[in-house]
Amino acid sequence: MRMIYRACVLGGLIGLASGCSIAAEDTGEAEQPIIFGEEVKECDRALAAVGAVVFHFFDPEYPEYGEFDDFFCSATLIAPKVALTARHCVETWYFDPEPAFSNYVTFGQDAYAPEHKAKITSFLAAPPGPAGLLNDGGRDIAVLYLDKAPKGIKPAQLGKFKTSMLGKKFRIAGFGQTEEFTAGIKYEGKATARALSGDWYPLLFNNDYEAFDEWYWTDASLASGTPEEEAAWWAPGTFALEPGYELLAGGLPGEQVSCWGDSGGPLLQGKTAKELTVYGVSFAGEGSIATNCALGGGYAVLNDEMLNWVKAAVKAAP
């Protein structure tokens, strides 16, 4: 975790009139995961490939602990029996396999009442590179191998993220926390691709130190509240995007941001299930006391190297 929310851990526009329409460009007062996002309608199949990573707990040796499901990350179906998520999602204790835990990807609007449920049989995590934003090696991508293909869900395509895409708007989706601190329901939003390199806090605040200073002392949910820490957060290199591998997206006026539980969720283009294309994976979101996570999201992008790695991982599916 360090000083930035991992969009995983525990556990996504304005409400539209009933029906299944694409979210309007303009925004007003937000109501609910993806921070300031819009709940995906049950009849909207465009984002059917976006699923939730869930563990089922039951230990027969300790039945007094009970039996329950809990959601902790998001993922996207990219082949009939392969889903794309964040590497740190498979490195948590939630992925401790037997005897107590079984891990699934669920599909549908509600992580706890899914339309489809596929058991994760194994996974493959991308090798880390030099330290990225969270100082843990960056390149936060993994694939999940499923025991069966969810019926009626078209896998999303894979797309290469190019530097020419900076400044363009993308769709984001996931089951993570909202500004209301709810989680487990699929939400979507819009996020502009802002930067592929640079220092996190100067990027978030457009190099406005006074704005950063005010936020640090009043609204930074993970701040210790010391001058030394504030100086370290702003200093070059303390928290920096791995150039070309990590992207800052979302958080501009009227836009949305990924949060806790949205880790592994996709950075997307395409309005229909046929067009849906994944260009990156959510792995971090900046914290705020007032609005949970609302300043900007970190995405591991599918550049040439990572796109080729994911394609090879799909081919290697057992």
Image (cartoon, rainbow, N blue to C red):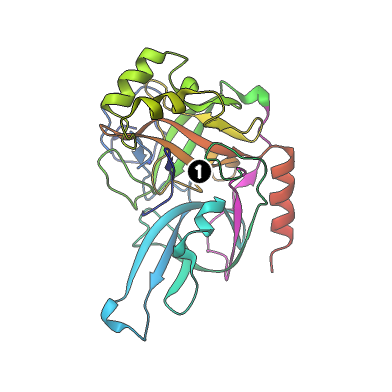
- Considering depth in this image, is 62 or 37 the residue closer to the camera? 62
The N terminus, quarter of image: top left
Q: Is residue 197 above or below residue 58?
A: above
| Residue 159 position in % (x across, y down) | 66, 39
Q: Is residue 308 above or below residue 253?
A: below
Q: Amino acid at mark 1?
A: Phe
Confirm whether the magenta stretch covers residue 139: yes
Q: Which residues are magenta?
A: 138-162
Per the image, the residue denoted by label 1 is: 283
| Residue 233 position in % (x across, y down) | 45, 28
Residue at image position (41%, 62%) is 115
Based on the displayed image, in which of its 4 quarters is residue 242 positioned?
top right
Based on the displayed image, in which of its 4 quarters is residue 130 positioned?
top right
Residue at image position (74%, 54%) is 312
Q: Is residue 175 left or right of residue 50?
A: left
Q: Tag 1's secondary structure? A: strand
